[in-house]
Amino acid sequence: MDQEPLILEQTEDTPAVSLDPNEEMFFIKGRSLPENPYQFYKDIIKWLDVYLTDQPNKPVTFLINLDYFNSSSGRFLLEIFSLLEKSSKNGCDIEIVWEVDKEDELMLEKGEEYQELLSVPVKIKEI
Amino acid sequence: MSVDSASAYEFFKNSEEYGLSFTYRGPFFDEITTRILDISENTIAVNQQLPKINRKVSFLLVECFQNIVRHGELATENNHDKNDDGVFSLKNLGTAYLINSINLVKEDQIEALKQTVESVNTKDRDELKALYKERLEQNEVSEKGGAGLGLIELARKSGQKILYEVEPCGNGLYHFHQQILLLNDKDQQPDHYNHIPTLREKYEMMDRSDVILEYKGDFSQKSVLPIINIIESTFASEAGSVRTLKRLIHILVEVLQNISKHALEKNGSKEGIFMIGRKEGRVFLQAGNTLENSKKDELVEKLKDLESKDAEELKQMHMKRIKESLNLADKTNSGLGLLEIAKASSENIKFEFEDIDRDRSFFSMYITV
């Protein structure tokens, strides 16, 4: 049975999330400033872990487009990327797209940091 | 930090007695009004420590704020060479709320203003109601857009006399100090609440330190989101500084969450303060909180370590730490806040400790965006 999609609406301090197997890509968009990001990200990480385990060969495109995120959210983004990296090492076709406003030097820097940290390719797309 | 700037601790002492202190020194424009409302509606609603007040407080806030927007003279338009457009403040003390403001008034208008306030102050409820109706029917709109109804409404809704003081400030202009009091408990003595001197002192500190906004109060997420929004609106209105705005908000979030995580609690609320301002074209943040002395050494060591690193070293350190944090058992505290602040700010974080007593210190940071 297909996994139920996980869709979260954007709030004032958490991003919109769409993890829907029927769509061509997964995404996290908006701003991520929760005081306790673990509460917010734990279900997302769990969902993704289950998905990647169940569908080890299905290609995944994961898009991130954030205005802001706080330092503790940064840790959970890395956890998401690490899951994707693991699948990529196991032969799954993974693409991480880091979408940034071309004026947004700060988010560009953040994207470059993740590029350096990960062996899975992070494609920076300036818009 | 220049020698004559007020420290975060001085600000803290000025605001110490208040459960909530929000002070804003402009720019004053209409869009900020809704943001100011968010403070009363969210901050007061979520903070268990603050007395709940009906919608009156929101109403009074808007009325007072718009009074400044509409009637306050602008320093620049009056050959007043100081950055002196006035100040607006919301404070909570026990079960009372105080809305204090200072704005600029021209010499030739000061007598009329005094007379209006005096006349409103001598009227009882019914008389005020009658006066309100009369003014409404006359439908006189002054050249600045108000109908002269503001003061009457303030007096009606607060049910207290409007406290004021007038003070010359040079260039033919006067500071008009005003206080609106909202008491929860009808038996209290309104005479006990004159906070005009406290705001005068704070305005002077803000002026000397180039601070434009001060907040002391609850630091939970719901309380600080409206503050973040005000700052975003204030700085977004200035052209050509997307980069600064981005860094500012980024640092601001870390600073506020840092206070929320590490400050000591007093009456169920984290005890801290923060200020934002602009000096010589650079935006800065000042933040302070009470801290157990036992945590001081570790913090000093951490800050000194950050101070010794250049930008590339900070970046490497951040990448190393964020990787390590994946293996930490404590998922709620990544410990990356200060490092993130050091990375995003353009100068070293300046810090200070003041002894409060044997067990506690006041820790403050000065951050240049």
Image: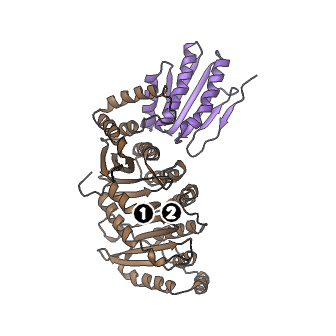
Kindly identify which residue carries mark 2: B30
Instruction: State which chain disc 2 sits on.
Output: B
Q: What amino acid does circle 1 point to?
A: Glu
Q: Are marks 2 and 1 on the same chain?
A: yes
Q: Distance between the residues labelled 2 and 1?
A: 30 Å
**Which chain is rendered brown in the image?**
B
The mark total stands at 2
Between B73 and B52, the one lying in front of the other is B52
Residue A28, x across and y down, in percent? 58, 34
User: In the displayed image of the protein, which residue is found farthest to the top?
Assistant: A91
**Is residue B264 depicted above or below B323 in this figure?**
below
At horizontal 57% and vertical 12% (from top left) the residue drawn is A90
Q: Residue at x 56, y 86 (%)?
A: B124
Query: Which-is-in-front pick, marks 2 and 1?
Result: 1
Q: Quadrant of the N terminus of chain A?
A: top right
Q: Which amino acid does label 2 sit on?
A: Asp
| Residue B81: mark | none
Residue B314's image quarter? Answer: top left
Q: Position of residue B213 (x, y in %)?
A: 41, 57
Residue A35: image x %, image y %? 52, 42
Badge 1 marks a residue whose secondary structure is loop
Task: Tell me the element at label 2.
Answer: helix
Residue pushed farthest right?
A1
What is the drawing colour of chain A? purple
Do the residues under discs 2 and 1 have CB atoms within 8 angstroms?
Answer: no
Can see residue B27? no
- Tag 1: Cα neighbours inside 10 Å, few (<14), some, or many (≥20)? few
| Residue B17 tag number | 1
**Dot 2 or dot 1, earlier in sequence:** 1
**Looking at the picture, how far across and down is residue B134, in whole percent?**
60, 85
Mark 1 belongs to which subunit? B
